[in-house]
Image (cartoon, helix red, strand yellow):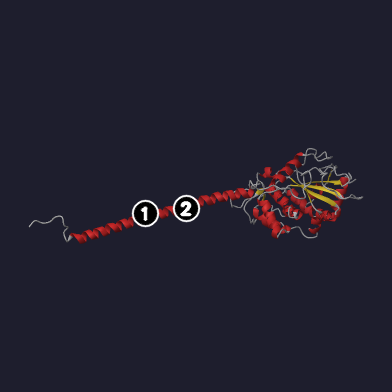
Amino acid sequence: MAKDKTKPRADLAPRREIEAKLEAEKKAKRRRRLAINWTIAIVIIALAAAGIWGAWSHVKSGEREVSIVGPANAAQLTPPNATGDGLAIAVKADEAAAYSPSLPIPTPMPSDTPTDTPSDAPSDTPGEEGIQNDPPSDSSTDTPTVSPDLPVPTPTANGPYIVDFYVDFQSFSSSGAQTAYGPALTALAGKGDITLRYHFLTSGDTTNANTASSRAAIAAACADTVGKFLPYTQTVLAATPISITSGGLVFGDQKLKVDFPAAAGITGTDLKTFQTCYTQRATSAFISTMSTANQTSAVPGNSTYATGVTTTPVMVAASADTPTIFQTVDIMTDLSNGPSSTSEDTLLTLIANAVNGVTAGS
């Protein structure tokens, strides 16, 4: 009888079953290996993407921190105590009185232990910004700017006086002037003996190739929106972290948004308002215009500053009954002897001498 070759041999069935199982296992193993390889690839791609995103975000964060321009939709505002001509921000007498000059100005922050991101480098690596060493301002007796739009107190026989103080937050000399005259200016403004106005110059940004002067001024203007303009301004000037070894200044978010407001007494909802204002750079347009205008506008009646004020610090004063004639107050003589604190009487004498045309030794 012929053999039926269409039927598999009985002894081949188990072998084929084993071969099929082995083949299935091989395919499953290949699928698992492929899945593992894809998973690894996806993880690597994800990590690379996260690294790139992190680096990009870090750069953008650094750029935002040192930028003097806020978000495109951020509304710009004018500080409530800005003078009518936009050249200065005036100090309210009650604010000055509340910020007692009998209390010490906030202690300067150590420059060798910065707590914030470097202000003008888009990275987290601690860095520093250079000091602007201003040429000495002319201390001859002349006349600077006054805003006729600013209400002035009723004049008396010896005053009151209008005092305009020009500073740059990156100027070592401005910081020294603050140390010498800040407490006395505060006391005199609080008593109504003077109307004190701060003019911010930001030329230190150009000198040092950064934006620290502008950002500090923007923050000070924001402090005016919560009634803390004077303490914040004087805190920044007095607490400027100057490193002698490296010659640097650091004005980062940590200091401008946290440390300085705390020292100036900005808390609670006022702190949130201030921080929002600064984060959005809501006063940047005002500060930019103020700096440019001060450097290009003639100080009425003052031949020294007939084309504007381009150096800091500069102090000029006028009698309230003649608010268009400002004379230069001789502060450089005192400063040349060191930034020690000047008494109220001494400063008032300097102001009165300037207004009345009295020169040293006369």
- Residue bearing mark 1: 34
- The percent position of residue 258, horizontal first and vertical second, equals 67, 57
Q: Is residue 97 left or right of residue 284?
A: right
Where, by quadrant of the figure, is residue 192 drawn? Answer: bottom right
Looking at the image, which is closer to me, 69 or 188?
69
Amino acid at dot 1: Leu
User: In the rendered image of this protein, does residue 133 appear above or below residue 17?
Assistant: above
Residue 49 visible in this rendered orientation of the protein: yes
Amino acid at dot 2: Ala
- The percent position of residue 99, horizontal first and vertical second, equals 78, 58
The mark nearer the N terminus, 2 or 1, is 1
Where, by quadrant of the figure, is residue 191 drawn? Answer: bottom right
- SS assignment at label 2: helix
Q: Is residue 317 left or right of residue 234?
A: right
- Identify the residue at horizontal 73%, vertical 57% (top origin): 264
The N terminus lies in quadrant: bottom left
User: In the rendered image of this protein, does residue 208 appear above or below residue 18?
Assistant: above
**C-beta proximity under 8 Å, tags 2 and 1:** no
Residue 243 visible in this rendered orientation of the protein: no
Q: Residues within 10 Å of mark 2 (few under 14, many from 20)?
A: few
- Identify the residue at horizontal 61%, vertical 48% (top origin): 63
- SS assignment at label 1: helix
- Residue bearing mark 2: 46
Q: Residues within 10 Å of mark 1 (few under 14, many from 20)?
A: few
User: In the rendered image of this protein, does residue 96 appear above or below residue 76?
Assistant: below
